[in-house]
Amino acid sequence: MRDFLKSTDNRRLSLIELLLEADDWMTIAELSKQLNSSTRALKEDINFIRNDDPNIQIQTGPKGIRIISDYSTGIQDYYSGLLRETLPFQILEELFFNESLSMSELGSILQSSPSTICRTIDQLNHHFSAYDCRIESNPCRFVGNERYIRNYYRAYFKEVSTVFDWPFRDYEEYLFDEMLNSVIAFLAKFSDLETDFVDFAFYDIVKTMITVNIIRYKQGHLVDTRDEESLLFKAFFNALKFFMLPKNIKEFEGLSITSEVVYQLFYPYLKKNIAIGIEPLNKLRKKNPTVNLSVSYLETYLRNFSEQMEIDIPEFDWLIASLYGTTYLEDDDPNAFYILYNRNKLFAQHVKHQYPMVYETLYTGIVEYRKRLNKPLHEDKIYLLLYTLITIWNNLLVELHERYQKVSLLVISDGHFSHAKMIQNLLSFELRQNVTIHTFHSPEISVDKLKASDYDLILSTFKLPDLKDKATIIIEHYPRVHDIKRIEKLLNCIIEDKQQQLTK
């Protein structure tokens, strides 16, 4: 949906994302080539961003250009600002809350001429025609593929606000909190749905989903659930309604809670073949051979990769259940749908940049798993599964960093042990945090002992004999600025060599 942005905003956003992805210095020539833009335009963009958004710091120097986002706001604030300031998105937000407006009234609210509103709606309709959606006029209403429309609004409100904001004007947040808490308590007591994963982020996603669904339903827009709804569910629901449902969820926002309303509010979690949690997935696997074979493939693939990397997967069953649940929720999950801020792609690209072999192996496994489930190989949905896999396999990146990013350095001084300790303390202050520094403290020293040590780099104040594959560096008795730079350069080379081992 970036086509709705002005060309300059689009280019500036691409510039920011490219610098974020690189996470390092880039030359203006590199940026110009990748963005297909003149160096003059890019320099103007850099000056504009510096002056317009103090939360994003673009640094320039002899090495080129790099970006540092303000730690108190983050890059999401930039995307949110673009959404709020861009007319097509303003129109869509206004239509969500008010479906009785003419084009003239809509223009008056958004301080735009009727002709501008008309032209912008034509642009929106051209875009949304691919998704079987359109904006009707007089009154202006967003209609068509209701699943897509609800997905759009859930993603929009997620990007334009944070968990501390309540973007739904004229609706009381506490009422939705009360209702959702009752539903979660009910599910925990009377169903197989596991609720251990309900943290504030998941809670906020579900609350946003329910709010969007209720508002659209009350406006008369229905999701077609005929292929998902069953007579057994209706009978089961009616029994629950009369005997077990708490009073405050038998009616909500003027709606009598019927089986249809439940489907309209919670349809993402009521799909056929969905399973959220370990036990529900185990039950489904016994009933559905396709699901069982696909999940079995994923289990075998990840176990083999874990053994190859010698990195254990804690809570393996939970990881598999989460990947399966994500696969079946993805079409209706705000984390899988984005307007401007494709956070899953940015996350995946950072992993790919740092650990290309690990990324490619996991990517290949996810693609094959999706094929076996007959799921489309949509790139953004693969990014979502990679994000889910890597974040739930929470020791993967830590152990990769320990193995391929962390280096150890041994300091040897022929002056005195306290001199070696002084150098150690000084280097601990000067060097990067992922360097561990030790001193050699033994009555005996030998070439064999140094060769057999696990240190990546040996620093000494005197000439060492040839240690073959062991990296060494010699400094004078006091480490100068020049020495620090030499050490840093050598450490970076060692880290690069370690990372290249992942591609062999």
Image (cartoon, rainbow, N blue to C red):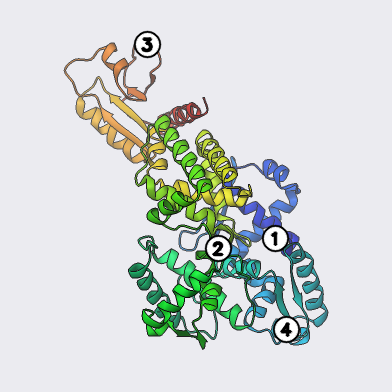
Residue 122 lies, with reference to residue 284, above or below; the image says: below
Which mark sits nearer the N-terminus, 3 or 4? Answer: 4
Marks 1 and 2, how far apart at CA: 18 Å
Q: Which mark is residue 2?
A: 1
Picture quarter containing residue 116?
bottom right
Which mark sits nearer the N-terminus, 3 or 2? Answer: 2
Q: Residue at x 38, y 47 (%)?
A: 317
Which amino acid, mark 3?
Answer: Asp
Which callout, 3 or 4, points to the residue nearer the camera? Answer: 4
Marks 3 and 2, how far apart at CA: 58 Å
Q: Residue at x 59, y 79 (%)?
A: 217
Marks 2 and 4, how far apart at CA: 27 Å
Q: Are marks 1 and 2 in contact (CB under 8 Å)?
A: no
Which callout, 1 or 2, points to the residue nearer the camera? Answer: 2
Which amino acid, mark 4?
Answer: Leu
Kind of element beneath mark 3 = loop
Residue to which mark 4 is pinned: 106
Which mark sits nearer the N-terminus, 3 or 1? Answer: 1
Q: Which mark is residue 466?
A: 3
Residue 271 lies, with reference to residue 244, above or below; the image says: above
Q: Position of residue 23 (x, y in %)?
A: 54, 45
Residue 131 visible to the viewer: yes
